[in-house]
Amino acid sequence: MKNAAELKARLVARALEEGFVACRICHPWDVPQVPERLQQFLDKGYHGQMGWMAERSHWRGDPSVLWPEARSVIMLAESYTPEEDPMEIVGCVDRGAVSVYARNKDYHDLVKKRLKRLARWLIEEARAQDEAAEVKVFVDTAPVPEKPLGQAAGLGWQGKHTNLVSRDWGNWAFLGSVFTTLDLPVDEAEPDRCGSCSSCLTACPTEAFTAPYQMDARRCISYLTIEHKGPIDEELRGRLGNRIYGCDDCLSACPWNKFAVAASDLRYAARAELQAPRLAELAVLDDTGFRAFFSGSPIKRVGRDRFVRNVLYAIGNSGQPELRSVAQGLLEDPDPTVADAAQWAVQRLS
């Protein structure tokens, strides 16, 4: 298209105005290594109960198959860097540790709205140049390999903890993408800059990393507390500590966070009641109370039963005898997984 370079420059400027910390571009076919790596991950069973990864592997492995008409992928990063050290709450025995990204509004909604505004702007700008542009926006919920695309576009590189890392904004960022039929100039891929550092690998409480750049999700606390249904293996329950939704240990350990950029959206700042919630209060939430308390939060999607299961594991790990009565009150819970977790917690505190 005519004036593609100029349009790209204005697109990047517009993205920064919207609140993104970075905007880079690649082709949908610039990640040829993904299909083989994904298949190896699936063959080892590392995806656990996430059957959707296998079911949609033909799309997740090759973004050009997801939408064959797309010529460019606009990759964007939005910072959610916490104001406080997220590790401070880990170890507060009577409180629950909630992953930084889930302490307020659901990022899917916030990022997608920005992406849609940017996509609409791009359509209008292309129209002004007599170009027809089609777009599709994605935030995490579609089978898009955001992190490999982010590295191909030059946003950053996939660190040894498998998350995207940047020299400019660390690793506290959400990723979003705009696929478009416009043929825009692409950026250079970002080289790996982890070097000999292994801070993220040794920080993992459950030893989920089988090797640098390889993770067995079945041992990852984020997977266990969010995706895994039913009882968690007893060998891993004690390693959860007080983490009741997600885990930030490997992200927090990354030394590149010295370049982290403050979040531009105040809705990522932690709600006061989620900074250090009391386990005793969370454990007694019924379904109605759970839905009301976590309205607008990504935590809501796991449901009351799975969440209370996590809280009971944290109670069992607390070493606080006064919390034993809280667990006892859930021994007859209608959900068998909650009842099992309550029994385990009571035994641990006896």
Image: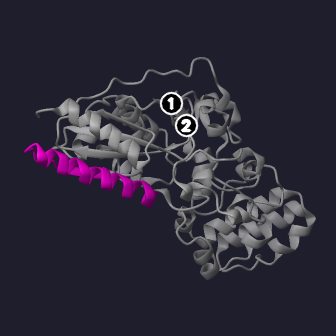
Residue at screen point 74% across, 64% down: 277
Nearest the viewer among 283 and 100 is: 100
- In the rendered image, residue 315, in percent from the top left (x then y), is placed at 80, 62
Q: Quadrant of the N terminus?
A: top left
Q: Is residue 301 visible?
A: yes
Secondary structure state at the residue bearing disc 1: loop
Q: Position of residue 103 (x, y in %)?
A: 62, 59
Q: Position of residue 47 (x, y in %)?
A: 49, 46
Does residue 26 appear left or right of residue 147 in this picture? left
Furthest-left residue in this view: 130
In the rendered structure, which amino acid carries the disc numbered 1? Ser
Placement of the C terminus among the 4 image quadrants? bottom right
Q: Mostly what secondary structure, the magenta segment?
A: helix
User: Image height check: is 184 above or below 119?
Assistant: above
The amino acid at mark 2 is Asn
Q: Tag on residue 264?
A: none
Vertical position of residue 336 compared to residue 299: above or below: below
Magenta-tinted stretch: 108-137
Q: Is residue 273 magenta?
A: no
